[in-house]
Amino acid sequence: MSPIRIAIVGVGKIVRDQHLPALAKNADYQLVAAASRHGTVDGIDNFKSIEAMLDAVSSIEAVSLCMPPQYRYEAARTALEAGKHVFLEKPPGATLSEVADLQALAEAKGLSLFASWHSRYAPAVEAAKAFLASTTIRNVKIIWKEDVRHWHPNQEWIWAAGGLGVFDPGINALSIITHILPRPIFITSATLEFPENRDAPIAASIAFSDAQKLDVSAEFDWRQTGKQSWDIVAETEAGEMILSEGGAKLSVNGKIAHDEPEQEYPMLYRRFAEIIKEGRSDVDLSPLRHVADAFMLGRRKFVEVFYD
Ligand code: NAP
């Protein structure tokens, strides 16, 4: 089969760090063009907008949309209307309803829409899911604490409404937990801390439960300096499970059960090629739904102003 002719839209940090290297190593794709207001990719045709790109390069079959979530819907609709398969960076959109609208459009057009969740493809996630399925879970704690100044310098969109604030990394934890737990969970209470000068939270404490009253909690904090934490700790009948380093490493009762190099973006692109071949979409909105629920149910606390 000839490679899928793909284009990238929104050339920024994640495109350079992950999308370009993953595409370069995958023979299922040929990267043919990019559209970005300022960014460019060497060796291919570059355009200032998705409209100009799709007009000029009619052979494009799929697009990866990598701009911030607040600006993704219009580009996704344009691409689907033009008959292209669409890969959405996480989070798939700024609202649940706009993504549902894209899902319906993709379905009507017979195109594949992929709401990618890169952390679900972290190396130890499947092993954690299998371990939890093999035992009885007593409680789960999610600890996702990082230094926003280090990881998101000068990213204004992340602090704007729809940018999600600390839920931008936190949704990665939610994408893992919704995949590895045996039953769906739901938020029972939350406190969101907003810097007085920002429209998105810098920290969040969340309590979840499920049909069997499982106690799940999450602490998201962007003010962490020093050691960073991207951990999920589960107390179970078979002992303590720690899924650490954002899903890269699994230990059970202190013994390493799984530790291998990450391949998240190569696996995302494999999955996208697979759903295109199968003629279907892959859109799980549960991580974004939890974020929406946290904004809906959460208490709001104002905290110290934040400047980069
Ligand atoms: P970024 O570098 O700040 O933004 C990506 C590109 O989007 C920018 O270079 C810009 O390109 C375009 N853009 C910015 N504001 C825009 C606007 N108002 N309208 C249209 N385009 C705009 O962000 P990023 O870190 O790559 O993140 C992009 C997405 O990937 C986010 O949803 C994020 O959650 C996700 N992601 C990021 C990481 C990470 O480590 N950074 C990891 C995984 C997933 P032009 O100015 O050239 O148009």
Image (spheres, rainbow, N blue to C red):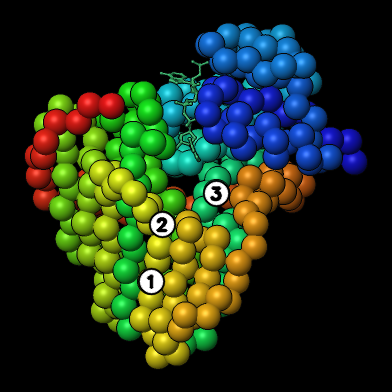
Residue at horizontal 70 percent and vertical 36 percent from the top: 21
Residue at horizontal 64 percent and vertical 22 percent from the top: 82
Residue in front for this viewpoint, 223 or 25: 223
Disc 3 element: helix
**Can you tell which mark lies on residue 118?**
3
Q: Earlier in the sequence, mark 3 or mark 2?
A: 3
Residue at horizontal 15 percent and vertical 27 percent from the top: 197
Seen in the picture, residue 283 relative to 61 is either above or below; the reply is below
Task: Determine whether, in the image, residue 21 is placed left or right of residue 208.
Answer: right
Disc 3 residue lies near ligand 1 with CB under 8 A: yes
Q: Does the residue at mark 3 contact the one at mark 1 (Cβ under 8 Å)?
A: no
| Quadrant of the rendered image containing residue 130 | bottom right
Residue highlighted by disc 2: 230
Residue highlighted by disc 1: 233
Disc 2 element: strand
Please identify the residue farthest to the right as the structure is shown: 1
Residue type for callout 1 = Val
